[in-house]
Amino acid sequence: MTGNSLPPVKLTDSGRPVLLPNEIECFFLSGVDLLCEDEPNTWFPHLKSGLLILTTHRLLWIPDAAVDASTSASSVPLASISHIFPHKKSLKSVFASPRVRFQVSPSPERGVATAGSRSVVVTVVVRGKGDCDAFVAKFWENWRARAWEESEKAMSSSSNVAAVAGSSSSGIYSSDGTVRMVGVSGILRKEQEMWESTDKSLQDAFQDLNALMSKAKEMVMLAEKMRQKLLSGSNSQTNTTNDEEMGSKEEMQELLLSVGIISPVTKESAGALYHQQLSRQLADFVKVPLDRAGGIINLIDIYCLFNRARGTELISPDDLLQACSLWEKFDVPIVLRKFDSGVMVIQNKSHSDEEVFTKIKVLVMKPDALRSGISPSDAAMTLGVAPAMAKEHLLSAESKGILCRDVSPDGFRFYINLFSEIDRDDMHLVKDHGIYASWIRATPAHG
């Protein structure tokens, strides 16, 4: 067994890789082996049968869980690749699996730390279905573009600014000779300057459509930073923040979450793996809106939210349905459900209909509800869901014999089911206890 000196890859709950800042997925290949051509005791391991994802920064290899659950996901930084060998075609290659060869050099600063310093030649063996020629073209394009250098420059410049700010934070005079703002007033001043800078970025981004498209990625990253700050602020200042401020923060978080996905899965990049990877990305995306909706949300709402987050990379309703149907094959905590009325929803596996029915029963047993029933809007306030979704829950409770329905020009009204409490031999017999007795006490006597 060879050692693995490659940087590990963090995965989401759905098995999607966690990308680096500014990193974008460019190509997917299934059934891929990464084999080292040197002796078996080299620092580069043999990685067999996995999903290979080419990004602007790395080659990501994710093992097939059905083949070897003990193998961890690994990455090869493009910065550690010193040479890509030309893809040669021959008569022999027509009958063999496509192969791509490249040379990797140990690079501790890139996370590839080894005891030795010798480079190795790695062969990509494509045993699954995929366009190997298109992969090679993208491989060369991303390796030559060197996008990771721009990310490193941005990180180094931000760290230099932070260092300068930290070194000049002592004393009451700033570099221009003015009196420095300290204490609470200084914090407020810094916050104001930050929001002014953010406001300027927003104005620049929305000047016209071209500016918006060019700054789309920047705005998504900015929104994510603002969301993380809001989340950390709400956790640390819970005791000192009133309900109105908390409400505005939650509203701001919801707006920022809808700004966009940095690296949406596309048919061009994923190819035959499009619906599989789209399904995993969708499973990660729906977590936040699903929690905010009480564990269940209409499929139409998710379609709108997901497409808005994907920007110009819109998906069709058929793509969404196919992606949701694949959740049965993955170990994800969400499922696609279809009500008897035909309405389709996404819900958490932990969502319990019995808990919903218990809340509905408590609601319809209140004196006002016993007299005049409840509407879907009443149930929506209690359950914390949309009225359309509350109506589906009420209809499900009716099918279980818990409720009865009354349809009038004013709409649907639901009442507690009393028929199971009535004695068929003596319909005028009123019991001293039970639902029927509660209904009699709540209903005014008629002369």
Image (cartoon, grey):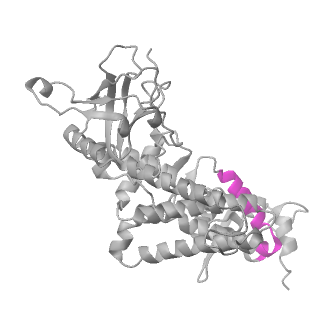
Q: Please say whether residue 343 is visible from this viewpoint.
A: no
Residue 407 at x, y percent in the picture: 60, 76
Residue numbers of the magenta segment: 352-371
Q: Quadrant location of residue 35?
A: top left
Callout count: 0
Q: Which residue occupies the extreme left position in the image?
A: 91
Residue at horizontal 40%, vertical 23%?
117
Q: Is residue 383 above or below residue 92?
A: below
Q: Is residue 43 above or below residue 195?
A: above
Q: Is residue 29 above or below residue 167?
A: above
Q: Nearer the viewer, residue 185 or 29?
A: 185
Residue 245 at x, y percent in the picture: 72, 72
Q: Quadrant location of residue 53?
A: top left
On screen, residue 402 versus residue 399, left or right, reads right
Residue at horizontal 60%, vertical 65%?
253
Q: Please say whether residue 327 is visible from this viewpoint.
A: yes
Residue 139 at x, y percent in the picture: 27, 41
**Considering the image in quadrants, where does the N terminus appear?**
top left
